[in-house]
Structures are given as C-alpha cells and as structure tokens.
Image: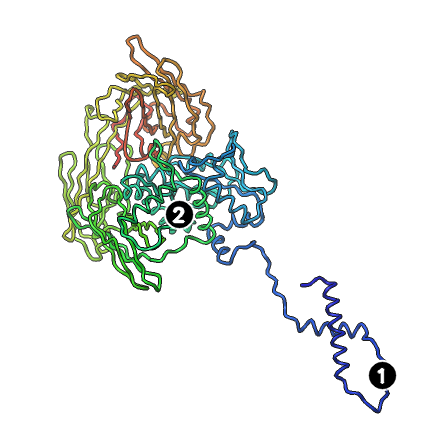
C-alpha cells in the first residue's frame, strides 16, 4: 500500500480526471444557456475515488512469521525439531549440547578463541544464528576455560554451545545425563562414530547406545540430531574407508525408524568434486583418495586423521543443509539389496543400480572392504542408458567369521560409486540369506555352572528351511536339527558347561566353533568366549599381560565400613621415568550401581592414575561425574581418592588405592553378601608392558566389559561369560 497522503493525492487527481472526462463527453444542449463552470464538491471526489480504488488490483500481503523459510523447510522443522523452531523464531536463547568424540578436539580457534567455534558444530550454530537473526551470535559454554567464548562480543540473543567429550557413543547417554544437563539444554547434537569405527565397536553396541540416548533425551523433553562420522583414509584405503561406515549404517537405520533427524558428515558428494570426464577405476580411485586426504590432517599417534579447518566449514554447511532440507540426491538410485552366503567362505552382495537421468550415465563402482572380508570379484564399470538399470554382483571371501553379523543377522557392506563429478559411499545392509545366526546376549553375569547362549538361527530363504547345526566347545561336540518356517527363527539347544573346581583358572578364553547347514550351504559362525570368575575381598587374583608372556602382577580388594581398597603388587615390573612422561598409568573402571541396575546396559568412565617411578603419592586425574556407572552425577574431589606407590624391604613395588564409600552412593555396600557386587576392570601400563584384569572387544567404558567383585571374603562360584 502507498502512504495515505500520496494515495489521497492520487485518488483526487484521478477523480478530477474522471470528472473532466465526463464533462468532455457530455453533449451540449442548444436550447439551454451554457452552465457556469463549477468545481466538483467533496462528496463527488470521494465517490469517484472509491470507484477508482475498486478497479485497482488487490495487493497480496504475506506475513513473514518464519523469516525466509520455505513451506518445505517449515514442514521439515515441524517434523523433527518443532520446539527448537519455536524458540528460534522467537529469538529466545537456545542451548545446544554437542556430544562427540575426538572430532570435537580437531580444530584450532586462533587468537585465543575457543576451538569449538571453528568446528563443524560452531559453523552450524553460526548458520542458525544468521538464519534466525541472533544478533549476539554464538557463545561456547566451557567451565574454567580461559579462551574467548565468542568471536565477537556483540550484545543480543545468543545460541549457546556446550561441548561434552567422550571417546565412545557407549558412554554418551551417561555423559549427557550428568555434564550435559548441568545447564538448560534445548537441543542435543550427537557426533560420534569416528573412534568407535576405528576400534570396531559392534553394531549391536552402537544400537544399544542409541537407544539409551533416545530414552535420556525423551525423558528430559529435549530434541536431538544424530551426525554420522567422516571416513578415514589410510593404506589400504579400501579398508580404512569402510571402518566408520558400519556405524553410519546403524545410525541411519535407527534414525529412520525413530523419526530422528540424521546428517551424514561423511557424505562425499558434498565434500569431493571429481575431475570431469570418464576414467578407469585405477585412475579414479587414487584421484578420489588424494582429494579426501587433502580434507584431513595427517594421522596422529592414535591413528585418527582429523578434518582440516576448511573441512570443518564444509561439515558445518552439510549439517545445516540436512537440517533445512535434507541431503541432496545423486544421479543414480540403489535398490533390492541382497547378501547371500555361498559356502566355503564365499558371500555375494547383489543390488540394482538405476539411472535417474534421461541421458546415459557412466558409473564406477568400488566396493569397500569391511573387517573380516576380502574382495574377490566385481564389475567396476557400468554404463546405463537413460532411465536404465542393471543388477550388480560383488563377491567376497570371508576371512574371519567373527566379523559376520553378531546381533541382527544383517550384513553391512559399503560401496563407493563415482559418476562424473559426483561420488558417494552407499551403506548397503541386508539380512544374510538363506539363513543367519544372531547372538542376542553378549555378556552374562553370575553364571553358575552352565552357560546357555541366546542364539537364534533365522530363515531368510523365502521358504521352509531344514537346517542342521553342530558345535564344538571345550573338546565336546553337540549337534541338532531344526525345521524353520519361512521368515521364522529357532533356538538350538546349545549348552556350554563351565570349567568347575577350585583349581579352574581365574580367566579363560576358549573358542566356540559353530556351523550351520541348510539349502546346500554350510557356514561357520565361530566365536570366542571369555570366562572370568567372580572374586571377593582378601582374595589375590592375577592380572594377565597383553603381550601373552607370563605375568606376576596381582590385584587384591579389601573393604570396611568407609572405604574400598585395591592393592596391585607389581612383581616383575621395572618402573622407570622417561623424561617428562609418567612411569606408569592405571585405568580403573568401577560399576557401582545397585545390583539390579548393574545387570542392565550402562557405562562407566575410567579413573586415571599416573605417577613417577619413585615412591610417593600418585596423581589422580579429574573424575567424570558418571565415572561409577549410569545414574551417578556428582563432582568428586580427587584429594579424597588415595593413590600411593611404595616399596617393601625386599624391593617389591606396590600401588595402593582407596575410594571413599560416600563416592559410591548408589551401591548397597552390604559387606559379607555375595550379591553386593561391583563391576570392575583394572588396566596397568608400566615398565614397557600392559596388564589387565579382563579384556575383550567391547569398549573399556562399557559396563558389560567388566568382571565382578563381590563384597565378601567368601565369594560364590559364579562367573562372567562374555561372547566375542
């Protein structure tokens, strides 16, 4: 609309023009004398103005309630993050908890500013601030930090970032429920998978951790985003590129099922632009690897190659794009994925690839190689006509059956596809055919004499399956037959008697050989089983050496009404100072939840104790609020935790620890009761060697990776049984 004064003037001029035109078109009447010239009165002008206004086009006025969000963008926000959208549109303070692993440590802020501001999370938060007009920008909440928390100290509404660092997604829920909830968070950004992918955290453990995070987020009425990791690239590249993709695959499936917003930070279609024109695979793959390497810093001592600052910028833009409108498509589509066992260590991946364009498409397919597999054969070059499709087959050799699906029977096989300037890793997942084996329980506590594995043999053949199974355990063979309906499953009657007697070793790791036959296919599903006996107070138990050589290091536990004591006798360990480095490191994981809670999934955080070779007090490092198990949330004074290295008259070295009972406030602390238990593990490094109480493939912070200490000097004859 025009301003009122201009409109009145315009309407007045139009009215005068209309009156003049009316007078000019009126015929003269000769019989009457000419009328005297008169000016139109106000009512005439008003009527003419109304007539003219009615003929003008109606203006369209749209209320900008969501700034410049499109309807599709608003719909996406309303689907995934409605509460956060409401606060952003009101320009209220929004706090984002960023749960992540080493990815949060990989940037330099420069000029004394917090490095998180330059990370992908900082770039994402700044994009939100710009989108929704937060004039105060982004502030990092990091207690005790001397770094500048903002890039520009402007006043106005702010978006707050609170980093919470854990090495594994296994402990992310515990970290969120403690450190993450110290403020008033609105949104949780989960950015794990880099370290989990490198060490091989299982798909089952990733899924369990995501469920724990979901429950923690929902119980607090928050919203969340899950971001998958960026791939690694080191020789052999086809293997390192696959390391994190299993984590990404599980995250993507979980988020789709739970309607949670997922962003793949490893989406190479938005990180890499391939050279124009077709090329042979042996030329394209090195060019691809070179570009990805340029996106990463050189690998550190931990083997991780972290994103450069420029890559963090790109990752932040990817995250913002996924929040606003989702990931872009590529010129091809994948469907009808199958994974079929072939017997004799063979497996075939089969899928359809279709051209989404009207023009021909030249594809290069490069299957990546997950742990436990070796690539045997595939068709690396495919030419598709416009809208055409073709079936692709990839043959693998199974080199280690321990890496066959453990929990859900689903094979996860990543494939890199390059077409023109586009490239993307597709995480292809499918149930093994014609059958699969799922191990529903990986750790069983307090097993008395016989372990009954929760194994299911599932039929995915499409028809009825007649199957046989055979197992070899501790020199004894078992076998059976199963008739399984289509899409059904059956549990074999497998029973594993545990070694009995007082002379049984404290720790054993025995192979379990299992083979299943059906539809003319015989497949081996071997596993290892670790058995660790429960131990009690005043009982000395051995620590094993990681190098497999004999060890004389032992552990003894004691307790009274106020403290828990742990004593390590370091027989045969030659401690020596190495300049500024510490002579030894002790990692103690202690699950001090109540008995019923301790038998459920959870996480701890290791108490880290270091020291020099000389006798004296050792250094107890900062203790995480959730250190003693999920549900703990306290601030611990390390001065209350005793740690001292001493020597006896005969030169034997001893490290003694003491923890106050008050720090373990969720535990029953019933002395003399075998069911008053702690989950425990001790890992000691010194004298160039590593020693441990228990050790498996699970993450050290996982409560199911621990064995059991009973608060009695008469421990029961029970064991922890762990399937690996």
Residue 674 occupies quadrant: top left
- Above or below, 688 against 480 in this view is above
Q: Quadrant of the N terminus?
A: bottom right
Task: Give the percent coordinates (x, y) of residue 580.
Answer: 39, 20
76 vs 264, nearest the viewer: 264
Name the residue beneath numbered marker 2. 271
Say if residue 311 shows up in the picture.
yes
- Which residue is identified by label 1? 35
Task: State whether residue 105 is above or below residue 622.
Answer: below
Q: How is the image coloured?
A: rainbow
Considering the numbered disc 1 on the image, is that residue within a helix, a strand or a loop?
Answer: loop
Left or right of residue 353: residue 103: right
Give the Cα separation between the discs numbered 1 and 2: 84 Å
- Of residue 713 and residue 641, the one placed in the foreground of this image is 641
| Disc on res. 401 | none
Residue at 51% x, 30% y is: 145
Rendered image quadrant of residue 166? top left
Q: Secondary structure at mark 2?
A: loop
Other residues around mark 1 within 10 Å, as few (<14) / some (14–19) / many (≥20): few
**Along the line of sight, the residue nearer the viewer: 286 or 347:** 286
**What x and y, as percent, mark residue 187?**
49, 44
Q: Position of residue 669 (x, y in %)?
A: 38, 25
Quadrant the C terminus occupies? top left
- Label count reads 2
Q: Are marks 1 and 2 in contact (CB under 8 Å)?
A: no
Q: Is residue 653 left or right of residue 122?
A: left
Residue 410 visible = no
* Residue in the picture at 26% in, 30% down: 719
Task: Please state the horizontal and vertical placement of residue 68, each as a whole percent of the image.
Answer: 55, 55
Q: Residue at x 86, y 87 (%)?
A: 33
Of residue 280 and residue 387, the one placed in the foreground of this image is 280
Lower position in the chain sequence, tag 1 or tag 2? 1
């Amino acid at each position: 609309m025009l301003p009122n004064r201009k409109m009145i003037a315009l309407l007045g001029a139009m009215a005068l023009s209309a009156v003049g035109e009316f007078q000019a078109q009126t015929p003269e009447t000769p019989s009457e004398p000419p009328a005297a010239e008169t000016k139109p009165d106000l009512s005439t002008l008003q009527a003419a103005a109304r007539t003219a206004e009615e003929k003008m086009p109606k203006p369209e006025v749209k209320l900008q309630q969501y700034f410049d969000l499109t309807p599709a963008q608003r719909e996406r926000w309303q689907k995934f993050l409605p509460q956060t959208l409401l606060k952003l549109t009101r320009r209220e303070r929004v706090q984002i908890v960023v749960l992540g692993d080493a990815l949060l440590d990989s940037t330099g802020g420069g000029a004394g500013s917090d490095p998180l501001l330059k990370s992908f999370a900082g770039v994402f938060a700044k994009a939100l601030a710009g989108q929704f007009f937060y004039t105060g920008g982004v502030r990092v909440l990091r207690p005790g930090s001397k770094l500048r928390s903002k890039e520009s100290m402007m006043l106005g509404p702010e978006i707050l970032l609170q980093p919470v660092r854990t090495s594994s997604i296994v402990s992310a829920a515990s970290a969120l429920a403690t450190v993450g909830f110290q403020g008033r968070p609105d949104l949780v950004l989960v950015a794990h998978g880099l370290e989990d992918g490198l060490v091989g955290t299982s798909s089952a453990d990733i899924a369990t951790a995501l469920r724990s995070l979901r429950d923690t987020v929902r119980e607090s009425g928050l919203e969340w985003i899950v971001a998958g990791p960026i791939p690694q690239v080191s020789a052999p590249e086809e293997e390192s590129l696959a390391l994190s993709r299993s984590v990404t695959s599980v995250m993507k499936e979980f988020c789709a099922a739970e309607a949670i917003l997922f962003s793949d930070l490893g989406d190479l279609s938005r990180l890499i632009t391939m050279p124009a024109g077709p090329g042979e695979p042996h030329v394209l793959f090195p060019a691809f690897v070179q570009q990805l390497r340029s996106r990463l810093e050189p690998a550190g001592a931990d083997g991780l190659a972290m994103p450069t600052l420029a890559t963090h910028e790109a990752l932040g833009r990817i995250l913002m794009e996924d929040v606003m409108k989702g990931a872009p498509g590529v010129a091809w589509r994948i469907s009808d994925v199958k994974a079929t066992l072939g017997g004799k260590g063979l497996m075939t991946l089969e899928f359809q690839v279709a051209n989404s364009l009207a023009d021909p498409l030249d594809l290069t397919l490069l299957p990546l190689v997950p742990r436990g597999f070796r690539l045997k054969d595939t068709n690396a070059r495919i030419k598709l006509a416009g809208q055409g499709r073709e079936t692709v087959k990839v043959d693998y050799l199974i080199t280690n059956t321990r890496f066959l699906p453990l929990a859900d029977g689903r094979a996860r096989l990543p494939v890199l596809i390059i077409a023109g300037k586009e490239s993307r890793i597709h995480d292809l997942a499918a149930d093994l055919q014609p059958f699969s084996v799922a191990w529903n329980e990986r750790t069983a506590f307090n097993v008395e004499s016989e372990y009954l594995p929760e194994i299911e043999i599932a039929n995915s053949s499409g028809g009825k399956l007649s199957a046989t199974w055979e197992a070899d355990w501790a020199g004894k063979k078992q076998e059976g037959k199963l008739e399984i309906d289509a899409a059904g499953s059956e549990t074999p009657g497998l029973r594993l008697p545990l070694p009995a007697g007082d002379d049984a070793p404290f720790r054993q790791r025995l192979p379990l050989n299992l083979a299943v036959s059906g539809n003319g296919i015989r497949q081996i599903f071997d596993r290892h089983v670790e058995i660790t006996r429960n131990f009690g107070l005043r009982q000395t138990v051995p620590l094993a050496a990681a190098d497999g050589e004999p060890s004389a290091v032992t552990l003894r536990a004691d307790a009274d009404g106020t403290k828990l004591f742990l004593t390590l006798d370091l027989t045969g360990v030659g401690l020596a100072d190495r300049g500024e480095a510490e002579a030894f490191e002790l990692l103690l994981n202690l699950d001090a939840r109540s008995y019923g809670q301790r038998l459920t999934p959870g996480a701890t955080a290791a108490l880290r104790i270091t020291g020099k070779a000389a006798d004296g007090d050792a250094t107890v490092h900062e203790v995480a609020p959730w250190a003693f198990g999920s549900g703990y949330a306290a601030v611990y004074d390390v001065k209350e935790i005793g740690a001292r290295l001493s020597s006896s008259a005969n030169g034997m070295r001893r490290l003694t620890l003491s923890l106050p009972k008050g720090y373990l406030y969720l535990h029953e602390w019933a002395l003399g009761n075998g069911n008053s238990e702690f989950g425990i593990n001790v890992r000691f490094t010194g004298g160039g060697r590593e020693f441990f109480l228990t050790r498996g493939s699970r993450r050290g912070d996982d409560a199911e990776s621990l064995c059991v200490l009973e608060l009695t000097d008469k421990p029961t004859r029970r064991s922890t049984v762990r399937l690996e």
